[in-house]
Structures are given as C-alpha cells and as structure tokens.
Image (cartoon, grey):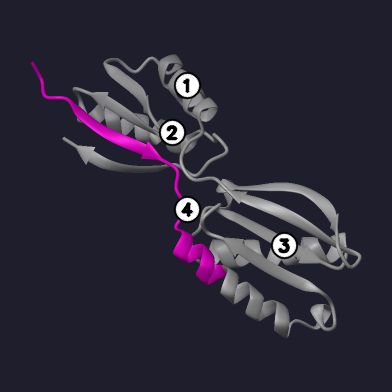
Amino acid sequence: MAPQCSFDVTSNVDLQEVDNALNQARKEVTQRYDFKGAKASIEFDPKDSKLVLVADDEFKLNALWEIVQTRLIRRNVPVKNLMRGAVQPAAGSTVRQEIALQQGIPSEKAREIVKFLKDAKIRKVQAAIQGDQLRVTSSSKDELQDVMRLLREQDFGLALQFGNYRG
C-alpha cells in the first residue's frame, strides 16, 4: 500500500501585519490634504478580528477604505478575507463601517471547496473538513500538486494558503 500524502488548506490573516498596515494608513490620513480638519479614524480590535472606519461622510469613508486597502496589499495581507459591513450613521454626524477579518475557512465555503474537488474527479483524492481548515489526502504527490493548482485557479472568495505538507 502506498503511503498517504496530505496537506492542509487554510485561510488566515497575519494580525501583526494588519496592525502595521493600519498604523501606516493612520499616518497617511494625518498627512493627506483632503482629510485636513475632517474626522477620520481607523480602529482595530485584534481579539474580534474587526476593523472600524469612521469618517465625516460616505465619500471620505470610501477614501479611507482605499487607503487601508492599499496599505494592506503592500504588506501582503489578503484583502479577499475582509468582509465590509453596511455603512451606518454614527455620533456627531459621522458614518462608520465595520470590516470583519475572516480567520479560517467558514463551513459553507469548506463544503463548496470539497464539492469542487469531488466534481473535478481527481482519482484517489479525499478532502476532509477539520474545524476551520481542510485536509486533502492522496497516495500520489502529483495529484496533490494538481489539487493545489486547481484551488489556486478557482476563486472561492477567500485567500487560500497551503501548508503542513506531508509526503
């Protein structure tokens, strides 16, 4: 019997990199001319994996989001894992928006990935959901490479990382 090879599929965001990117974004906001005299703040709660953007109006809120997004991309933080909430009126005639950081693969996305792999009909490949990650096993390393290639090509709305490879 051939030995089983496996790897894990995860979707995580480095919270330290997010914090660094947000510090850079705050610095840029204080230096930008279009934000002079305006209320604009970026708050980050690493425990809840949540960002809160506050600005004078929706236009400034979108500009603030662009700054944050640019800084996150520069620090290699996957912006696919950010889920923007609805814009809400806040105190002092400002608006606020909560942005959730997706840590791990949600169960509905995990089922979608498993279904995608079954529909791809790659022989001898099994995918199992383990909490907020997937474990893909096969007796062939080549088939696991094909699975990685297929998953990279497909857009599931999350940035997928592959790790814990055992051959």
Asked if residue 14 lies in the magenta stretch, the reply is: yes
Residue toward you, 150 or 6: 6
In this rendering, position of residue 45 left or right of residue 134:
right
Residue toward you, 31 or 151: 31
Asked if residue 54 lies in the magenta stretch, the reply is: no
| Labelled pair 4, 3 in contact (Cβ < 8 Å) | no
Circle 4: is it few (<14), some (14-19), or many (20+) Cα within 10 Å?
Answer: many
Amino acid under disc 4? Val
State the SS at label 4: loop
Mark 1 → mark 3, Cα distance in angstroms: 36 Å
Q: In this view, does 88 lie above or below 93?
A: above
Residue at position x 50%, y 28% in the image:
107
The residue positioned farthest toward the left in the image shown? 1
To which residue does mark 3 refer?
Answer: 53
Decide which of tag 3 and tag 2 comes sooner along the chain. Answer: 3
To which residue does mark 1 refer?
Answer: 116
Which of discs 3 and 2 lies nearer the camera? The answer is 3
Q: Position of residue 140 (x, y in %)?
A: 20, 25
Mark 2 → mark 4, Cα distance in angstroms: 18 Å
In this rendering, position of residue 1 left or right of residue 78:
left
Decide which of tag 4 and tag 3 comes sooner along the chain. Answer: 4
To which residue does mark 4 refer?
Answer: 13
Q: Where is residue 114 in the image (x, y as percent from the top left)?
A: 43, 22
Q: Quadrant of residue 26?
A: bottom right
